[in-house]
Image (cartoon, rainbow, N blue to C red):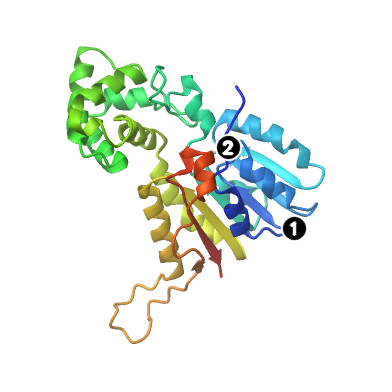
Amino acid sequence: MEFKHYSVMLDETIEGLNIKPDGVYIDGTLGGAGHSSVIASKLGKKGHLFGVDQDEDAINAASKRLEQYKDSTQITVIRNNYVNAVSELKQRGVEGADGILLDLGVSSFQLDTAERGFSYNVDTPLDMRMDRRQKLTARDIVNDYPLKELARIIRDYGEDNFAQNIAKHIVEARQVKPIETTFELNEIIKASIPMKFRATGGHPSKRTFQAIRIECNHELDVLKDSIDEMIDFLNPGGRFAIITFHSLEDRIVKNAFKKNEDPCVCPKNFPVCVCGNVSKGKAITRKPILPSEEELEENSRSKSAKLRIFEKA
């Protein structure tokens, strides 16, 4: 199956990165190299693109797609989680980057490849690992997590009002037999939500599947642990673009950018700052950039996307 991933807000992201032909750029979520191929096309022989992804299928597809640019620029593809990108580059002697991109969406390929277990629309074993080298799977979470933990992740990561009831039904069902497939989980979730609420708000499994995927891949922890280090790694004037797909991610990005722009912790009534914390730059998007109407018509999966950009001082 061909690795497909619609590059969300491609023009807005490339424009926001303000690419210099001789710059160093990191795409921390390489995917099918949609954004990266455009970055590579704008770099000269002195430019360098580092593409990072933990998904083996993405690495293979992106490497193939980027081959055409290897004569005109330097390209390095690395299989790793983006949380390790800065330390990987430092080990390779790189001292800073002029632009960093994170596109946090699950790729269309991951959603559409049945055996990956990301989609509630296909009956397949529960998996949801972005890096199939890791041991923890969605099946482990569904069958092994205690009731309280299940309810917490569905409430916090899925923002589902029926989290407690869904968790309770999961625990009851797995006492009869292990929950093995996406459709088995679908039926349990459906039975946990009152009929009148099932008629609105999209597929009843959407929020729970999102929550389990986030937990399985530690997505929010990885994001929190990456932003400050990546901002520190930017060269002066360097740009950091992050595309998020739900409010939990967007809140983390918004707050991290704000803290790096204004890190002062002095009480508001102090006439001058005495804490010594210095601003690292500024968020150049006061409000997030949203997909255009044309893009939404072309790709419905981009409807929840938000782009924020930070510029290093």
Instruction: Return the x and y of residue 263 as percentages of the image width and height.
Output: 41, 70
Q: Is residue 222 left or right of residue 270?
A: right
**Viewer-side residue, 285 vs 264:** 285
Q: Is residue 232 above or below residue 243?
A: below
Which quarter of the image is occupied by the N terminus? Answer: top right
Amino acid on which the number 2 mark rests in the picture: Gly
Q: Mark 1 = which residue?
A: 22
Name the residue that disc number 2 marks. Answer: 31
Give the image location of residue 237, x and y in percent.
Answer: 61, 67
Q: On the rendered structure, is 72 left or right of 177? A: right
**Nearer to the camera, 187 or 39:** 187
The answer for how far apart the CA atoms under marks 2 and 1 are is 23 Å
Q: Quadrant of the C terminus?
A: bottom right
Can see residue 64? Answer: yes
Q: Residue 96, percent across and down?
A: 63, 58
Q: Are marks 2 and 1 in contact (CB under 8 Å)?
A: no
